[in-house]
Amino acid sequence: MTRLKVWDVPVRLFHWGLVGCVALAFYTMKTDGAPFIFPIDIHARGGYVLIGLLLFRWLWGLVGSHHARFRSFLYSPASMWGYARRLASGHLPLFAGHNPLGGLMVVVMLLSLTFQAVSGLFLTDDIFFNAPLHGLVDRSTARTLAGLHQLNANLLMGLIAAHLLALVVHRLKGERLVGAMITGRKSFAGEPEDEPAKAPVQRRVSAWVALGVIVLAALPVLWLWNA
């Protein structure tokens, strides 16, 4: 049994922060929002934090640790199809980072969440709430974005359901993905296909690089929060 450190602390904090923001967003819009007095305001502020988290993840996917980088988990269509066939046959291919289908799901969810968060900046309820960028678009555009915002919310629910189903399938096959996102480490009975034993050791990301990414991601959150 081999135990490898896969997910760094920033990736894990991003993941659980994302879970919290998305849960808050759905709660404030799909229920009465109790005990919040103005649920839509809480919904919006959760969206501002979500924008910061997403900006961080897009940047970290370029300069972060090895398995956090997009280039480490973006595979060709042939690789994704091959992985799906092996998984369907009952064999669980071993991957330290995101597997080919998981990597695709990550990008799709990031794109959907990014559209959801950004489109929300232009919306209004025509009564109590105007988003920070609402004044930059005309009424027709705002309504179109509101419709797309709602449609994309439904898409996100489907993506989240698919993600949860994938977690269950992998758990039944012996791969504990949730635990790895808590501890940062994964255990393998063999050699992962994306991290062979003879691969060069991956260097740690500079603390200054990490701090720079965090600052860049925090700036729009601070501006939106006080807009």
Image (cartoon, rainbow, N blue to C red):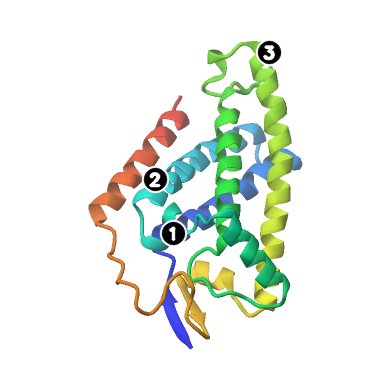
Q: CA distance from mark 3 to mark 2?
A: 33 Å
Q: Which residue lies under the disc numbered 3?
A: 140
SS category of the residue bearing label 1? helix
Query: If you read the primary sequence from the N terminus, does the residue marked by circle 3 or circle 1 appear first?
Result: 1
Q: In percent of the image, x 64 and y 60: which residue is there? A: 81
Figure check: 196 above or below 8: below
Query: If you read the primary sequence from the N terminus, does the residue marked by circle 3 or circle 2 appear first?
Result: 2
Residue 166 locus on image (x, y percent): 68, 64
Question: Hey, what amino acid is under mark 2?
Answer: Leu
How dense is the environment of label 3, judged by Cα within 10 Å: few (below 14), some, or many (20 and up)? few
How dense is the environment of label 1, judged by Cα within 10 Å: few (below 14), some, or many (20 and up)? some
Number of the label disc, if any, that sits on residue 176: none
Q: In percent of the image, x 34 and y 78: which residue is there? A: 198
Image side of residue 202 versus residue 138, left or right: left
Figure check: 156 above or below 189: above
Choose mark 3 or mark 1, whichever is in front. Answer: 1
Q: Which residue lies under the disc numbered 1?
A: 72
Q: In percent of the image, x 66 and y 58: which residue is there? A: 163
Q: Which residue lies under the disc numbered 2?
A: 59
Image side of residue 7 versus residue 108, left or right: left
Q: Is residue 14 visible?
A: yes
Figure check: 217 above or below 128: below
Image side of residue 32 versus residue 203, left or right: right
